[in-house]
């Protein structure tokens, strides 16, 4: 980041004052005069639109980008509410960065913010610790049933599956580390997804479609794509490499948008579209893990769209009547 940086951010008020100067005007009164300005900053649609518009601009992400400096300082302030406000823009930040990184453009501003988020994720997990899950081993007897024959020998250890490799400290973003770093940032975003506003999740699903670079049967001739850069540029959000370390957190976020506790039909439709595009991308790369995961998600999205039939008890009532008649007949014959 540049040396002529603004004063450091220590509070939500500092962040609001600095952001107002960057955006070139006073923030809406609903944010500036709010009792909890950081929470208002997280959910205000006008401020979010202004920030995402700047991030999508053709000159954004450079080393002297003041908005990237603000995101960096706001997150490093260690104010939890401000960190949530920064995470709200991760879909646009990661989306624009990955699309432009393919053309090898200098993006030091974006990379500084991503590295700050990555360092925070690595500190949360612990140095050199992988994210794992224990799977039951079928060689062991079930704990819910009594075994007829006592097991011989010691029980077999549980199988341990690695969900995410240890996060090594990185001070720069190289092409070989890009997917690893962005994937860890997306996992950090996924952990706070319940606090993210609807528009942030919609942005993410839209960028997933661009990253996949494939078509969906849900797309019509008039389907709107991501808007171009707001300053008149005709930038195209392009297909990007999606190795498993990046594909996995992407799919986790899309699954939450599709199946999570949200009442937005628009978000579910957008997530279903993203899941299908990712499925076709997985079939192109012939990645068995990605194909299996995306196919399951697409099928779940189809189940969500179909109404669940109401159970019918008419057959059970008829069977009970027949059983009562048989019972009465047996009792009469035994007299």
Image: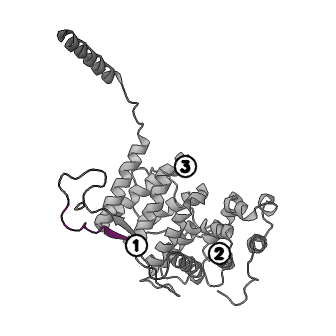
Q: Is residue 221 above or below residue 174?
A: above
Q: Is residue 127 above or below residue 52?
A: below
Work out how far the residue at label 3 is from the one at label 2, CA to CA, in angstroms. Answer: 27 Å
In the rendered image, the residue lying farthest to the bottom is 3
Report helix, strand or loop for mark 2. helix
Location of the N terminus by quadrant is: bottom right
Q: Is residue 261 magenta?
A: no
Report helix, strand or loop for mark 3. loop
Q: Is residue 303 above or below residue 199?
A: above
Residue wearing tag 2: 75
Q: Quadrant of residue 140?
A: bottom left
Location of the C terminus by quadrant is: top left
Q: Which numbered disc, 1 or 2, marks the residue that appears first in the sequence?
A: 2
Residue wearing tag 1: 245
Using the image as rendered, state which of residue 19 and residue 160 is in the foreground.
160
Tell me the crowding category of disc 2: few under 14, some 14 to 19, or many 20 or more residues within 10 angstroms, Cα based.
many
17 relative position to 109: left or right? right
Instruction: Name the residue rendered at 39%, 51% in the picture.
Output: 217
Using the image as rendered, state which of residue 47 and residue 221 is in the foreground.
47
Residue wearing tag 3: 262
Q: Which residues are magenta?
A: 151-164
The spot of residue 229 in percent (x, y) is 60, 68
Instruction: Name the residue rendered at 42%, 36% in the picture.
Output: 307
Instruction: Name the residue rendered at 44%, 52% in the picture.
Output: 272
């Amino acid at each position: 980041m540049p040396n002529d940086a603004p004063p450091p951010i220590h509070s939500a008020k500092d962040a609001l004052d600095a952001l107002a100067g960057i955006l070139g005007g006073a923030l809406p009164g609903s944010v500036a005069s709010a009792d909890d300005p950081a929470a208002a900053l997280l959910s205000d649609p006008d401020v979010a639109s202004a920030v995402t518009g700047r991030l999508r601009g053709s000159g954004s992400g450079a080393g002297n980008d003041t908005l990237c400096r603000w995101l960096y300082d706001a997150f490093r302030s260690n104010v939890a509410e401000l960190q949530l406000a920064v995470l709200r823009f991760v879909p646009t930040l990661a989306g624009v960065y990955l699309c432009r990184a393919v053309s090898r453009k200098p993006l030091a501003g974006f990379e500084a913010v991503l590295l700050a988020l990555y360092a925070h994720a690595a500190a949360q997990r612990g140095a050199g610790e992988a994210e794992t899950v224990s799977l039951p081993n079928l060689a062991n007897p079930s704990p819910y049933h009594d075994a007829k024959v006592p097991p011989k020998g010691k029980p077999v250890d549980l199988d341990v599956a690695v969900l995410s490799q240890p996060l090594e400290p990185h001070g720069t973003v190289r092409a070989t580390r890009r997917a690893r770093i962005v994937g860890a940032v997306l996992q950090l975003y996924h952990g706070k997804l319940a606090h993210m506003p609807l528009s942030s999740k919609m942005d993410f699903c839209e960028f997933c479609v661009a990253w996949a670079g494939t078509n969906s049967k849900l797309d019509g001739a008039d389907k709107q794509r991501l808007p171009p850069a707001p300053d008149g540029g005709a930038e195209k959000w392009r297909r990007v490499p999606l190795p498993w370390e990046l594909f996995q957190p992407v799919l986790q976020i899309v699954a939450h948008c599709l199946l999570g506790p949200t009442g937005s039909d628009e978000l579910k439709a957008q997530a279903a579209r993203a899941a299908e595009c990712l499925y076709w991308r997985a079939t192109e790369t012939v990645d068995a893990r990605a194909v299996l995961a995306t196919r399951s998600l697409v099928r779940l999205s189809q189940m969500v769209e179909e109404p669940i039939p109401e159970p019918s008890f008419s057959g059970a009532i008829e069977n009970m009547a027949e059983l009562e008649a048989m019972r009465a007949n047996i009792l009469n014959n035994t007299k």
